[in-house]
Amino acid sequence: MGLYLSLVLMALIVSFERSLDDGGELLMIWGSSIGLTLAHVLAFRVAYVYEHGSTVGEGWVSIGGMFAAAFGVALLASVPYAVAFQDVKASSLTTVVLLAVIGFGTYLAGRSRGWSGLRNLGYIAIILVVASSVSVVKYILTH
């Protein structure tokens, strides 16, 4: 959830940074985070019931993790807006923060597979290029 939300927020910030002020960007970050998390939880819940034929009480631990990840990403994405920087836009710093979240998540994924440092570094580089490309494509398509 955290990686997915980071990708989406990065694409939104790149797409709308010229048309929104800092307050509008913060609203977009939190509104998108809440809306996407709720949509993801609904889809996950339906898929979980379909896959497992479970009762209503099962599968909620994963959903709690999704909300925690989404809250963490939204909070990290908001930090640059709370700190004043002279010549750097908060949206630019937020994009870097979100790339760092994606990079860290990718690192953890590769490490969980037992990959060597070099292989994991290559994996991280590929994922960061793809993530950046998604933002560029989103920008091109919306402008």
Image (cartoon, rainbow, N blue to C red):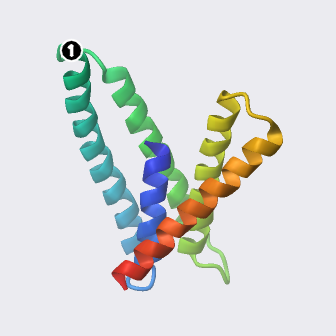
Picture mark count: 1
Residue 137: x, y in percent? 45, 74
Residue 48: x, y in percent? 26, 25
Q: Can residue 90 be seen in the rendering of this structure?
A: yes
Q: Quadrant of residue 50?
A: top left
Crowding at mark 1 (Cα within 10 Å: few <14, some 14-19, many 20+): few
Residue 67: x, y in percent? 38, 37
Horizontally, is 2 left or right of 130 in the view?
left
Residue at 40% across / 61% down in the picture?
29
Residue at 48% across / 66% down in the picture?
134
Horizontally, is 85 left or right of 3 in the view?
right
Pick the residue in front: 110 or 36. Answer: 110
Residue 23: x, y in percent? 40, 72
Horizontally, is 56 left or right of 15 in the view?
left
Residue at 32% across / 45% down in the picture?
37
Q: Which residue is mark 1?
A: 54
Q: In the rendered structure, which amino acid carries the disc numbered 1?
A: Ser
Residue at 24% across / 30% down in the picture?
47
Whether 81 is drawn above or below 121: the answer is below
Quarter of the image with the N terminus in it: top left
Pick the residue in front: 123 or 95. Answer: 123
Whether 32 is drawn above or below 110: the answer is below
Whether 55 is drawn above or below 127: the answer is above
Q: Is label 1 in a helix, a strand or a loop? A: loop
Quarter of the image with the C terminus in it: bottom left
Horizontally, is 74 left or right of 58 in the view?
right
Q: Can residue 94 be seen in the rendering of this structure?
A: no
Pick the residue in front: 79 or 124. Answer: 124
